[in-house]
Image (cartoon, rainbow, N blue to C red):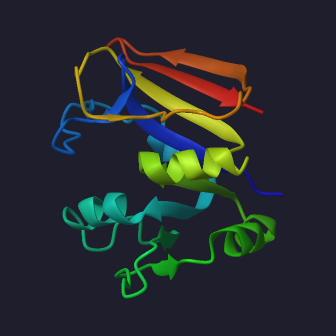
Amino acid sequence: MRKIILNLAVSLDGYIEGPNGEFDWCFTDQDYGMSEFLKGVDDIFFGRKSYEALIGMDTNPYPDKAKFVFSENPGYAATNAITLRAHLIKISEIKESRGNDIWLFGGAELFNKFLDMDLVDELQLSVHPLLLGKGTPLFTSRNKITRFNLAETKSYSTGLVQLIYTK
């Protein structure tokens, strides 16, 4: 079965975006393993806000990947992507279909829903060596303990560290 992998940047103090939704603090001076990661995924799951922020920079990001945008708004239709509302049924169908893994792009609200439903198989966190002070935290309050096992670490000359956790 395909894995759902959360792969994102996070600050040392646990934020995935700044107080105004900005992510210009993310290091872009090198690839940081993204090219290799993208070879291993066929589909991308987005929350509506994350998708809209991304298409504001590129009208068809990741054109070789199937894109699914989760929205509770009944009138919302994503551009160049499939909009999903029947979350659990569709997620199971997609996860059980043939293909490479699925990238859970974000945002925090969608990730935490997936975590609550025990749908996240792997965390790939690129920890940037800076403190944002405020913004959107990666984790919201939890009702239960969710355990992961450290599978791999990678460090870069910039101080960025990637932590890979599996179930």
Tell which of 83 and 54 is nearer to you: 83
Tell which of 58 and 4 is nearer to you: 4
Q: What residue is shown at x 70% (from left), y 19% (from top)?
A: 150
Q: Measured along the vertical axis of the image, is residue 73 above or below residue 16? A: below
Q: What residue is shown at x 50% (from left), y 54% (from top)?
A: 110
Residue 90 on image: x %, y %: 68, 75
Residue 162 on image: x %, y %: 50, 23
Q: What residue is shown at x 73% (from left), y 47% (from top)?
A: 118
Q: Residue 142 sits in which quadrant? A: top right
Q: Tag count in the figure?
A: 0
Residue 87 on image: x %, y %: 63, 70
The N terminus sits in image quarter: bottom right
Residue 130 on image: x %, y %: 26, 16
The C terminus sits in image quarter: top right
109 with respect to 20 (left or right): right
47 with respect to 44 (left or right): left
1 with respect to 57 (left or right): right
Tell which of 64 and 150 is nearer to you: 150
Q: Measured along the vertical axis of the image, is residue 162 above or below residue 115? A: above
Q: Is residue 162 visible?
A: yes
Tell which of 80 and 86 is nearer to you: 86
Q: Is residue 38 visible?
A: no
Q: Residue 15 sits in which quadrant? A: top left
